[in-house]
Structure formats: C-alpha cells, structure tokens
Image (tube, rainbow, N blue to C red):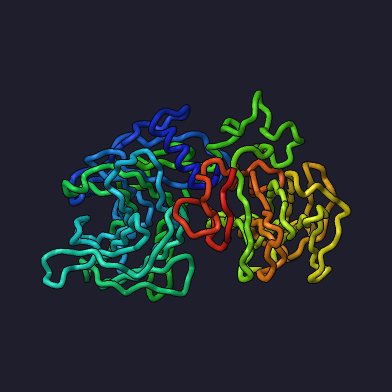
C-alpha cells in the first residue's frame, strides 16, 4: 500500500468525508457566496476552522475538493482584506506567485462531472471571468489551458498553453503577471509559457484563487472526482526596487483537519489542511497489538511485511535500457539529507539486482548496493572508482532477501547496510558530497544499458519503503504493490501510479 503524499491526502479526505476523530468543523463549510461561477466576492465568515494538534517536524499541506453540487471548492486570498496580512499592499500591478500544486483523483465521486482545477488571478474590478488577469486550467487529460478574450470581444474562450502535466505528480508553478498579460513556468524549468492575453488589462491584481471544480452552467453543475493538493504558496510584488514577498503560507501552523476559515483567507470552501503524520502507527500495516508490522524484526524499516501476493518483476531484454522501478520524490519533498530505505529482492536472472539511492544535483547515486546472480552482496564506494567491493555476505538469490540502508549526508561519508535485518557494516557512500538531499530510490537489473537477461529470469521487488530519517519513522513512501492490477507496467509513463517514467519494464505480477 502506497503511503506517499497523495495517498495521505486521499486517506485523510476519506476520514473527513466519512468521519474521523479530530475536530474539523463542518465538512463543507462555505465562506462567502454568490458571484460568477459560484466563486463569490464575499469575505470570510463563521468561526475559525479548528484543526488537530500541530506535530513539530511534520509537513502540512492543503487540500481542495468539490463535494457539493451547487458550490465549487476554492481557497482565495484578497490582498485588500486586512486579515490577509499583506502589510497594506491592496493590489499588485506586477508580480508573481509560486506554489506546489498537485491535481489528482480521490475516488469519492466516480460519477463526478466537475473535473477541472484552476489557478486564477482577478483584478480590482471583481471576480467575474471578465476580471481575470490569469486563469490556468488543469484538466483530466493532462493539458494546461488558459482563458482569453474571444476575437469578437463577446466573451472568453479556453486555449491550450502548450504545457502539460501528469495527474498525481507535484508541479512547482511560477505564475507571473503585469498590467497587460501573464506567463508561467513549471518545476524551475527555463521554458516560459506566454505571455498570454488577459481578459482584464490595465488593472492591478487583487484576488488570488486556487479552485477545484465548476458550478456555473447546468452541464457542469456537479461534484468532482478530483482534488487539488497545494503547499508553499508565496506571492511577490515586483517593483523597481526588486521583488518583495507580501504573502506566504506553508500550512504548517494549522494542524490536521483545519478548514482555513476565519483566518487570512478571504474564502475557503471544501478546504482542509493535511499533515503527513496522519497515517502513522494506527494505520493498516498488518501489525497486531502494537507491533510494527515487520514480523517482530528489530525496528529495521518496520511497517513493511515479508513479501506475499503481488510484486514487481523487472524484465530486461532491451540493450538500450535496463529494467527498473523508480520512485522519485516531489520537489518539495527533496529537503532531507538523511534517510532510510528498504526493499525485498529476489533474483532469478543471470544479472545483478541493484538498489540505488540518488541525490539531488549529483551524477552518481549516494548509495549503490548489488545482489549478484550468485548471491554475493557487493557495494560501490567512492574510493573504488568504478569497481564493486565485496561485503563478505552471500545470500540465496532465489529467495526473498531484505536489503536496508540508512544514511546522513551531513554526518559523515558512510552509510549503514542491513541484510535481512542484520547489521552487516558501515561502508563509504558512492557519492560523499556533504548535505545532499534524496531525489529518488530505485531498483534495477543489470550493470548498464547494454546488459540483458539471458536466462529468462527476473529481478523481483516487493515492499519498497523510503523514509526521511534514519530511524525509519518519517515515512515518505511504502508500497506492497497490492493496489495495482496484474500486468501494470510501473516503468511506463502513466497517470495511474506514483512511479517515475524513467523506469522500464517493471511489471506487476503475482
């Protein structure tokens, strides 16, 4: 079962809809009303949306859904409202915002029809479509569109920006504007989309809105099977003196279940704060009576059981690529220099199975460990160059073997290795750069693209786990692959799973 950020969001939203043990107030609390498309110009109302206790060190983020037919889910900042805490800046002629933005399915409304998400800027004239400075539209096909005036001036129309996204994957969006148009970029890339013509020109931006769903016309008047997950919202004003940060929120000050009403947001509808600590010791980890779900093993990467049922088989018959399953962290998750990873590997092929922990902005992995087809466990330290060194450990490669590593790139140049939950030693990392954060964890077959499996076997993978601490308690991702249909390729580009498309031939089997 995957416990990635997106799955935490789905799990906690299920609790929100169907009952949970913390006080979140009304499920569909609406502040403000009326206005075009059901967005409304009204200000905040009602009591502050209380949440659970705040746990130090936990990352909290914001979720928007659309669970009510006659409204739409949204979160809005009004720069001209005193509660927005913008120090007297009521509107912005020229500026930009950044936000980590994920558009994904949540599964509550399989017949939902309101399936677009929006990032919108409205001017001082109001929050109708005619007052938009920018409107980025994210739809379920994976394209990003924008709203622009029709050529005859009778209204607006939606056109493609040329940008696309993958559902369930986090985007870091930078949206910039001046008095006449707007442009945007994604994930820190050099490609700038735009400038695009705005429906409203010559007026300052006053309202910033993140929105999920539609409620305007009869054919779109419904609920949505999708949701928006957002984090680290920042709004800047640009002047001749430079860029000034006027508003920011990382949602870390609210606690699980907070509805963001009664605070610095002008409108909050179907909004809830989520922490990545929501799924913890009480989650379904197959443990009983307080056990860690690891068959009594001594805390080594707990909450992942001995393999059973479905697993991933890595096939490699292609000389131009290696069979691989790769889980890449979103940009906002690549903030930790220590971690722990574990995976069960069974190798029936005549090639090696390799576990790689890759860091940010470095060419070689932080850690590389290999189980050869003869069962020898070897690793690749920096000092050896391109050579693999023996650990002195040999396993039966035809059986499941648990490989676990833990590291802290701020502490020293080494990492700890466990084989079947037995500590085997501390070894030099393949890359010893200080302070490197984790980018992805991967298992692959072979020593390079030119190697292929010649005996028809596979490298099998199960119970993959990644944590952001060496204790193995701050969970980033775990998966026993039971949630996938047999035959699913987790190495292929797809919007139906969390794995990086850089993988290849990673087939779910049973």
Q: Is residue 167 left or right of residue 89?
A: right
x and y, in percent, of residue 332 in the image: 53, 56
Q: Is residue 82 visible?
A: no
Q: Residue lying at the far right in this picture: please name it.
A: 392
Residue 501 to residue 406: above or below:
below
Name the foreground residue: 440 vs 309.
Answer: 309
Name the foreground residue: 187 vs 224.
Answer: 224
x and y, in percent, of residue 94 in the image: 33, 70
Q: Is residue 395 left or right of residue 311?
A: right
Residue 241 quadrant: bottom left
Q: Quadrant of the N terminus?
A: top right
Q: Quadrant of the C terminus?
A: top right
Q: Residue lying at the far top in this picture: please name it.
A: 289
Q: Residue lying at the far front in this picture: please name it.
A: 455
x and y, in percent, of residue 75 in the image: 34, 48
Report the residue at 56% width, 54% height from top: 333
Name the foreground residue: 196 vs 116.
Answer: 116
Q: Is residue 380 visible?
A: yes
Report the residue at 48% width, 68% height from top: 188
């Amino acid at each position: 079962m995957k416990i990635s950020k997106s799955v935490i969001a789905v799990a906690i939203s299920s609790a929100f809809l169907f009952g949970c043990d913390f006080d979140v107030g009304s499920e569909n609390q609406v502040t403000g009303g009326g206005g075009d498309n059901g967005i409304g110009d009204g200000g905040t109302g009602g009591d502050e949306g209380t949440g659970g206790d705040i746990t130090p060190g936990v990352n909290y983020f914001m979720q928007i859904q659309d669970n009510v037919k006659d409204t739409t889910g949204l979160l809005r900042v009004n720069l001209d409202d005193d509660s927005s805490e913008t120090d007297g800046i009521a509107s912005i002629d020229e500026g930009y915002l950044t936000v980590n933005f994920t558009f994904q399915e949540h599964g509550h409304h399989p017949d939902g029809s309101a399936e677009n998400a929006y990032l919108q800027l409205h001017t001082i004239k109001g929050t109708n479509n005619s007052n938009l400075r920018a409107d980025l539209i994210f739809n379920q096909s994976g394209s990003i569109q924008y709203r622009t005036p029709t050529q005859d001036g009778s209204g607006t129309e939606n056109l493609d920006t040329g940008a696309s996204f993958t559902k369930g994957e986090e985007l870091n969006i930078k949206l910039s504007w001046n008095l006449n148009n707007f442009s945007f970029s994604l994930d820190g890339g050099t490609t700038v989309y735009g400038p695009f013509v705005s429906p409203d020109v010559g007026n300052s931006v006053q309202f910033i809105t993140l929105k999920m769903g539609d409620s305007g016309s009869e054919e779109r008047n419904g609920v949505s099977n999708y949701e928006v997950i957002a984090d680290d919202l920042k709004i800047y004003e640009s002047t001749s003196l430079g860029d000034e940060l006027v508003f920011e929120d990382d949602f870390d000050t609210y606690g699980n279940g907070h509805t963001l009403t009664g605070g610095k947001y002008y409108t909050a509808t179907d909004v809830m704060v989520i922490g990545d600590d929501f799924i913890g010791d009480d989650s379904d980890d197959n443990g009983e009576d307080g056990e860690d779900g690891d068959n009594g093993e001594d805390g080594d990467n707990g909450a992942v059981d001995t393999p059973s049922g479905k697993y991933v088989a890595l096939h490699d018959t292609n000389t131009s690529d290696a069979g691989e399953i790769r889980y890449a962290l979103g940009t906002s998750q690549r903030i930790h220099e220590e971690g722990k990873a574990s995976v069960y590997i069974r190798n029936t092929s005549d090639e090696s199975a390799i576990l790689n922990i890759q860091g940010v902005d470095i060419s070689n992995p932080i850690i590389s460990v290999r189980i050869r087809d003869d069962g020898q466990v070897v690793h690749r330290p920096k000092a050896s160059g391109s050579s693999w060194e023996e650990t002195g450990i040999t396993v039966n490669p035809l059986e499941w073997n648990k490989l676990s590593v833990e590291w802290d790139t701020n502490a020293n140049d080494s990492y700890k290795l466990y084989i079947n939950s037995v500590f085997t030693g501390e070894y030099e990392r393949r890359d010893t750069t200080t302070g490197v954060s984790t980018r992805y964890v991967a298992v692959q077959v072979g020593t390079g693209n030119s190697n292929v499996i010649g005996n028809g076997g596979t490298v099998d993978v199960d119970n993959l786990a990644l944590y952001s601490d060496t204790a193995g308690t701050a969970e980033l991702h775990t998966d026993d692959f039971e949630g996938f249909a047999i035959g699913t390729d987790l190495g292929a580009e797809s919007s139906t799973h969390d794995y990086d498309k850089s993988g290849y031939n990673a087939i779910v089997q049973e």
